[in-house]
Structures are given as structure tokens and as C-alpha cells.
Amino acid sequence: MSTTVDLSFSKRFEVQVHQAYQRMGSKLRNTVRSKNNVKGASTTFQKVGKGTASTKARHGKVPVMNIDHTPIECLLSDYYAGDWVDHLDELKIDHDERAVTANAGAYALGRKTDELVITKLDTSTNYAGANTDGMTKAKVLTAFEMLGEADVPDDGQRYAIVGWKQWSELLGIQEFADSDFVGADDLPWRGTQAKRWLGALWMPHSGLSVASSVRSCHWYHKTAIGHASGANVKTDVTWHGDRASNFVSNMMSQGACLIDATGVVTLRCLES
């Protein structure tokens, strides 16, 4: 047997982890402003203010808007997810243990990615409605109005993430679930757990924060949250002869930050 067989094993394993992470690891990474291949322990996202148009005198100078630029620092942290794969165990089982371990590591890192984003969304204090009831039509419309009044762009890049309890409550709202209002193509009953409504992509998420039976759901614009990656998912497979096992170590370096608080509206929903 070739002495480089372990290198082949390691490369194939890393490909499996990367594919699993891309396929099912993170639900929120593509919904926020993202920066890859960051060098160093932090990076900066620019928050750009609003400009104001004005008149000028004939032959006069064009007025300068002096748009405010605020740098938002995003700190990166290193995260790891590892496990042992016993050599002889692989000979005794019918399933592909390597694929199982690869998926488990990728999903763990994917959940961490979403956790980073959710932690920053939770810093929002733009609350729509009270926290004494669940997800109601009135609460949704209040959030919709808040985003509009804040001039948050309605450009197809708005996202709303809710808990599964709130998703069930949304299904009870006729305007959300009835084809007479949203059309047959946007019905939430078609197998996919995401749908467009009120100019946003709505989807349920099991990782949203809950405190005292109150779930924090968020409606936000893609540019309001920043996500930075210094190193995407990497895998190292090392043979340990004293254990007759491979140790599979998955790792990544990522971080998230709140760029523009006005682009996030939080819907606090009581779960009875």
C-alpha cells in the first residue's frame, strides 16, 4: 500500500466537510454582508450615511454631500470541531463513518456561523410591538412600517428569520398562507421551509435566542449585518497509532458585527 494513502484520505475528507458545510451548514451566511479571506484578527466594514441633494447658483460650485463614513470593526475568532474515527470500527459498520463524521463537523461549524450572526442581531433594540403575545399580523405590519420609515431598501435583500413556533403562527395568518394573497408559487406548504412575503424572504430557524419564554425574531436587510471569514472550513486528519484511530479536526476563523442598527427590526414573541 502506498505510504501516501493517508494524504488521499485527508483530502477526500476535507472535500466532504466543505461540501456539507456549503450544502447544509449555515442558513444565514448568505443573508448578510460577507467578506472572505480576511488577513489578521479583525476587519472593517464601512457604514455609509445618507447624502442630501441641494441646489447651486449658476456657475457656482456643486455642493458636497460630505457623506458620513463610519468604520465598523469585526473581530474574528477561531472555532474547532473534532472527533475520533477508530480504524477497526470502520471495518465493522455498514455505513460510511467518514461521511457521518464529516457532516457532523460541518454542521457544528455551520451552527456556529449562524450563532455569530444571531448574536449580533440580538443587539438590536428596534422592537416591533410588545413581548406579551406571539407572532401576529399586527406585529408583522408594525415591523414592516418601521423598516419603511427608516428608508431600509426594499430591493429583494430583506430577510426575516423566525422560530418554528412563530412559523406555525404565521401559517395561521391568511395573508401569509393563502394563495389568494401570495400566489401559488409562494405558498409555504410546498416542502421548502422558506417563502417570500412583504418583500422579504421568510424562513424558520431553530437557533434563535429565547429568554423567559420570549423568542427574538428578526427582520433585517443584508447590509445591516457583517460576516467575515479569515479561514473557511478546513480539515486536518491525523493518524494516532497509540489509539489506532484517526483524529478528524475541523476548524474555521470567523466573526460577525452589527453594521447598521436601523436595518434590523426585532419581533419579540411570547411562546406559551
Image: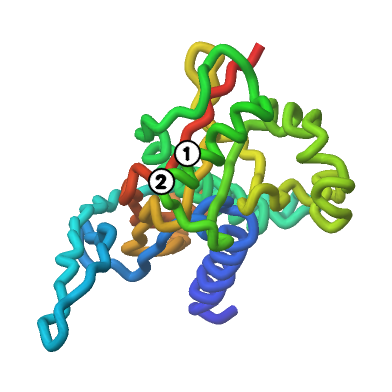
Residue in front for this viewpoint, 144 or 267: 144
Residue 247 image position (x, y, % from top left): 47, 52
- Indicate the quadrant containing the C terminus: top left, top right, bottom left or bottom right: top right
Q: Residues within 10 Å of mark 2 (few under 14, many from 20)?
A: few
Asked if residue 83 can be seen in this view, the reply is: no
Q: Residues within 10 Å of mark 1 (few under 14, many from 20)?
A: some
Residue 182 drawn above or below residue 65: above
Q: Residue at x 21, y 53 (%)?
A: 73
Residue 129 image position (x, y, % from top left): 52, 23
Query: What type is the residue that disc 1 sits on?
Result: Met
In terms of secondary structure, where does tag 1 sit? helix
The answer to whether the residues at label 2 and label 1 have Cβ atoms under 8 Å apart is yes
User: Which residue is under mark 2?
Assistant: 150
User: Relative to residue 31, is residue 62 drawn left or right?
Assistant: left
Q: Residue at x 44, y 49 (%)?
A: 242
User: Relative to residue 137, is residue 118 drawn left or right?
Assistant: left
The numbered disc on residue 146 is: 1
Q: Residue furthest left?
A: 60
Q: Residue at x 80, y 45 (%)?
A: 188
User: Relative to residue 124, is residue 2 drawn left or right?
Assistant: right
The numbered disc on residue 173 is: none
Residue in front for this viewpoint, 2 or 225: 225
Asked if residue 192 can be seen in this view, the reply is: yes
- Indicate the quadrant containing the N terminus: top left, top right, bottom left or bottom right: bottom right
Task: Give the spatial CA distance, label 2 vs label 1.
Answer: 6 Å
In terms of secondary structure, where does tag 2 sit? loop
Residue 237 image position (x, y, % from top left): 47, 61
Residue 231 drawn above or below residue 92: below
Residue 8 drawn above or below residue 157: below
